[in-house]
Image: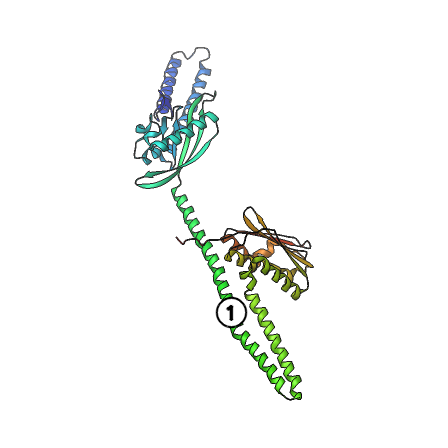
Amino acid sequence: MWVLNGYMNEHVPFETIGLARDRIVELRAHLGLAAAAPGSAELDSSLHELEGLLEKLQARCTILRELLEYAGDIFFAKDPRGCYVMINPKGAGLFGKQAVDVVGQDDFALFDGPRAQRIMASDRATMESGVPSVFEETVEIDGLPARLRTTAVAWNEPGGKLLGVLGVTRDISERKRAEEHANRKHKRLQALAAEIVIAEENLRQTLATDMHNGLGQELALAKLRIATLRSESSPEWNAPLLRIEHLAEQAYRSLRSATYQLQPSSLHDLGLYPALQWLAGDTSARYGFDVEVEEQAGLAPLDGCMRTMLFRAVRELVLNSARHARPRTVGIRLDLQAGSMRVRVEDDGAGFDAASVESADYGLFGIREQLQHVGGSIDIDSRSGAGTLVTLVAPFSFELPVAV
């Protein structure tokens, strides 16, 4: 593009190059009349060189014109007043205009008043500061909303004189729609993750209740009947019936432990901290190492979904330590940080290569996926022989997203 009387005209560079070539032809004719003049050979060589430079300039101008003609983005230049001195056909056509209709006009010719004012104010700030600007605007094109992203830079002569602003605008509507679709999909996955946790917990609760009310009551009744039968039987039956009574008692205790493993009543009745205290005692009794639970004072209670998810995650981590790390102690710490619940599970066991194990461990993978889908995270720090620290982060509450 070329500046002429304050505006850009795509034909000017080609006309200027043509005039320069005509002048070279005239000079060659003049040299032909004075071929023997001193320095004529050197001048002829210089003219050849100048012709080569003009050819290269014309080729580059042609490339630039083709790029601006067929580019999918909008290219523009504005003077210090904010008036267009150049806009490519794509840019003008996007607004149903010809480039000649836009040149000389400011942004009020293309946008509504408030939007035009914002764009021109951004351009002025770019020219004053020299700092490139990036901004987005939503406009209506052919009756449909379009999201446009513009990058603008100050336009200066080589000597430093400000000529205005240069910019490129890209229609990012498709990308925005793809992002919105991805966000809706992510929210649906969040809802599904929470629903899975809730459905699993409901199933555990139903199964635990059925076991307690069904098999548990039958074992308790059997134990009572055996005790009654033993008291009414002859002495020789006392020892065998007592052994059967002890077996019934062991079965009843095992059933109670299994129902509590399925659904600790303290988790729903009292909260996460008491449930983890029960987990600590149960794990210590089963595996023979110390488990300590600490809680930051004054923590607000978690909602049911988060409480259940974190308890299941901590239980998985503690059991992993028991099975693989052979620790002496495991520490569990509940804190509030940055508005989220943070649970640290640390052991002094064997440790492992977190990168290689995590990808193959279904339990860790499941914890990560569930936490990520509700806006949480898991961080694993472990090295062979140096123990393991796992940090779980989760929001205090989670509202099921509306499926869109």
- Tell me the amino acid under the disc marked 1: Thr
Taking the image as shown, residue 114 lies to the left or right of residue 319, namely left
**Residue name at image x 38 percent, y 30 percent:** 117
Q: Is residue 88 above or below residue 188?
A: above
**Residue name at image x 66 percent, y 63 percent:** 284
The colour scheme applied to this rendered structure is rainbow
Q: Which residue in the structure is indicated by mark 1?
A: 209
Taking the image as shown, residue 350 lies to the left or right of residue 83, namely right
Q: Considering the numbered disc 1 on the image, is that residue within a helix, a strand or a loop?
A: helix
- Where does the image place residue 302, in percent across and percent down from the top left? 53, 54
> In this orientation, does residue 154 appear?
no
- Where does the image place residue 77, in percent across and percent down from the top left? 39, 28
Q: Quadrant of residue 24?
A: top left
Label 1 Cα crowd, 10 Å radius (few <14 / some 14-19 / many 20+): some
Residue toward you, 55 or 333: 333
Q: Is residue 330 above or below residue 11?
A: below
